[in-house]
Amino acid sequence: MIGIKYLSDRAHKYLDDIGASHWSRHAFNTSCKSNMLTNNMCESFNSVLREVRDKPVLTMMEWMRRYVMKRHYEKREGVKKYEGKVMPYVEEFLNWAKKESSCCDVWASSDDSFEVEYMSKQYVVDLQSQRCSCCHWQLSGLPCQHAIAAIHHQRANYEDYVHEAYTKEKYMTAYRSPIPPMPGISQWERVGLNEPLPPPYRKLPGRPSMKKRRKEAGEGGSTEHPKRQKHQRSCGKCGELGHNVKSCKNPAKETFKQTRPTSEWTKKVRAVTDKRKAKKQHDAEVIQFIATGSQPQSTQESNAPNNHTRSSTQGTQQQDGGRTNRRRRALAFDGSSNRQ
């Protein structure tokens, strides 16, 4: 409670007002031997009703009665073949408690009173009253790992300290009375009460559905859908009704195409696209020049006024012994394109 008060004063006040017996394990009533703190049984039964949840009331109740009748019979027949003293779930829990009891240290105080240390914590176990200071034995009726350690110290049988609610005899008592079968609705006894009527129709808010169902015979109205009216199309050449373009003899009608004004964003996109196309074309010309050694026609036309530069370059190449360097020519071509 001190930690809860440190986190929230409102939560501490709420828990203090309703009492510890509603939310704390140490204050629970020990007369009901159960270790279940949630509504798992209700959730399990609710999942079983999933397939009949949208059925009428009588249909759903009949399905539930038949399901419970069949379940009681299966449980009653299944437990007859079981030979143990306690149920299988209890045996699984006791096996787990036996493994955990190996980590316990036991000191005897008397024949039935023990002090048990587990995980650096001390607990008091009384075998005669079947109590442990951890409160698990009192609440569930199953001996905890501390009690199992004390029982093992006394060389006693573990099943003798399990509550009788978990024995085979009590299980048979719970499913001993069968659910009686019932005849069909047509054989039920008639009474003078009014028959139940369906709930009144209530118009829900929102737009009505546009999908109309076809009415059956006798519901009013025809079963066939009404025919749609024929739509007379106009000529695409002159715009008049009654004929089409192939049979039209009238002069063509002047039409004006409406176009949207070009936005700034469209202009920017087009400019970027044009730049990309120009760069791609330039790269293709450079590759062609490197591969073939001859300038494209567009580059030759752009470099036509600079013939004296080309002649001087050719003279220099002849002085160098006629050696050709494709890399130098590619760089010269690239420079001329950039100047352009």
Image (cartoon, rainbow, N blue to C red):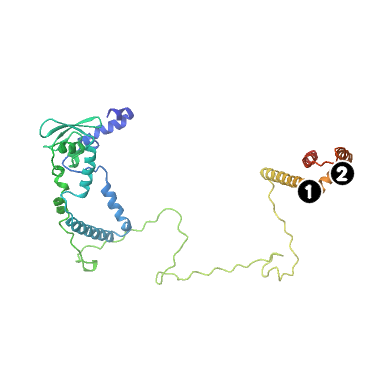
In-front residue for pair 310/269: 310
Query: Which corner quadrant of the image does residue 50 belong to?
Result: bottom left
Query: Which corner quadrant of the image does residue 115 belong to?
Result: top left
Q: Residue furthest front?
A: 321
Residue behind mark 1 = 292
Q: Give the class, few, some or many, for how many residues have Cα within 10 Å of label 2's Cα (few <14, many ≥20).
A: few
The answer to whether residue 204 is above or below residue 181 is above
**Horizontal side, residue 320 vs residue 16: left or right:** right
The disc, 2 or 1, on the residue closer to the chain's N-terminal end is 1
Give the amino acid at mark 1.
Thr
Please tell me which residue is depicted at 10% across the width and 31% down the height of the picture: 110
Residue behind mark 2 = 304
- The x and y percentages for residue 278 are 74, 45
Please tell me which residue is depicted at 69% across the width and 52% down the height of the picture: 259
Element carrying mark 2? loop
Please tell me which residue is depicted at 11% across the width and 35% down the height of the picture: 112
The answer to whether residue 119 is above or below residue 41 is above
